[in-house]
Image (cartoon, grey):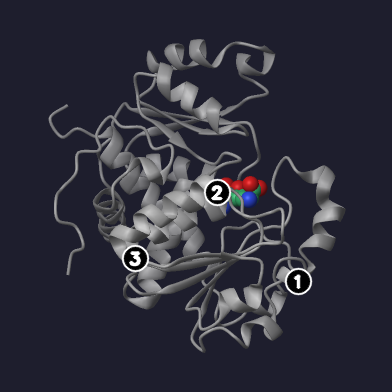
Amino acid sequence: MSQVDLQPTLYGKDFLSLKDFSINDIAYLIEKAEEMKQNPYQDLFKGKTLAMIFEKSSTRTRVSFEAGMTQLGGHALFLSSNDLQIGRGETISDTAQVLSGYVDGIMIRTFEHEKVEELAQYASIPVINGLTDYSHPCQALADLLTIKEAKGTLKGIKVAYIGDGNNVAHSLMVGCAQLGCDIAVASPKGYEPLQEVTDTAHEFAKQSGAEVIVTTDPVAAVQNADVIYSDVFTSMGQEAETEKRLAEFKEYQINDELMRHAAKDYIFLHCLPAHRGEEVTADIIDGPHSKVFQQAENRLHVQKALIKELMYQPSK
Ligand code: CP
Ligand code: NVA
């Protein structure tokens, strides 16, 4: 049965953080992604362009948005910040206004979340967050779709995220709290999710009935969890802290020993790229519980549903 009560209007909106959307909006987007997966080639965007600005590396985000635009009849433009005038000091506001005259939407991956907010403020077209240091909302949509496919539902599913309370953890927490998944996040002291994000998750959880737990204890977090989630210990831009992080995250590896505490039929998710032998052992990520490649494929389906909702108007 559909979780969606009202059909929301998302046309023309930016997609910067899940918290900007209602529970109904997010449930609707997941349903639209399921439909998109069934009907992947649609001629919606003839003559339309999505500009994609990358200030960090990407495999999945770049290729899934680019292939997604092609599958919907449009074009995607890869813009590395090294080649754009942004790299030589042109302002975000000027870039936003110029691009708004050429293209129909902008996807951006960068460091500071404020930069994406500024881009959205000055652009007259939808802006999509393709990852900042603060959040990764497109990833969370794919995560929710994958959990729904694997478990048949989202409500009442117990998700455990083990590792850095970072961008991926932030979006996962909010998305789970919105759609009724219990979420436990276990991070080393000093690497917890931002309090503001935990508070937002608690607010949504009051509406959805989910439980939100933040702890330093990975064993407590994975207890009977249906979904185990991990991300790298060292995110893009933090490379100078690699050695320190490897030492401080040692107890937060997903391995057989820790998984003895998870539900027997748990699934393992990871946003990728992964470092086997660091945050997860090879036998788990390459083993029977892992859904990481289905999850990676789902980036394509959720983002196509997203750009369709944000950028396509049937009458135009
Ligand atoms: N998960 C994810 O965003 O992957 P990329 O960094 O390859 O885009
Ligand atoms: N937390 C990781 C996610 C990569 C998709 C990073 O920011 O590098």
Residue sitting at x 66%, y 56%: 164
From the Cβ of disc 1, is ligand 2 less than 8 Å away?
Answer: no
Where residue 4 sits: x, y (%)? 19, 57
Q: Amino acid at mark 1?
A: Glu
Question: Callout 3 environment at 10 Å: few (<14), some (14 to 19), or many (20+)?
Answer: many
Camera-side residue of 110 and 114: 114
Q: Secondary structure at mark 2?
A: helix
Closer to us: 231 or 35: 231
The residue depicted at 37 percent of the width and 53 percent of the height is 203
Mark sitting on residue 195: 2
* SS assignment at label 3: loop
**Residue at 63% from the left image edge and 88% from the top image edge:** 260
**Residue wearing tag 1:** 251
Q: Is residue 17 above or below residue 258?
A: above
Quarter holding the C terminus is top left
Amino acid at pointer 2: Gln
Q: Quadrant of the N terminus?
A: bottom left
Judge by depth and name the residue closer to the eye, 226 or 269: 226
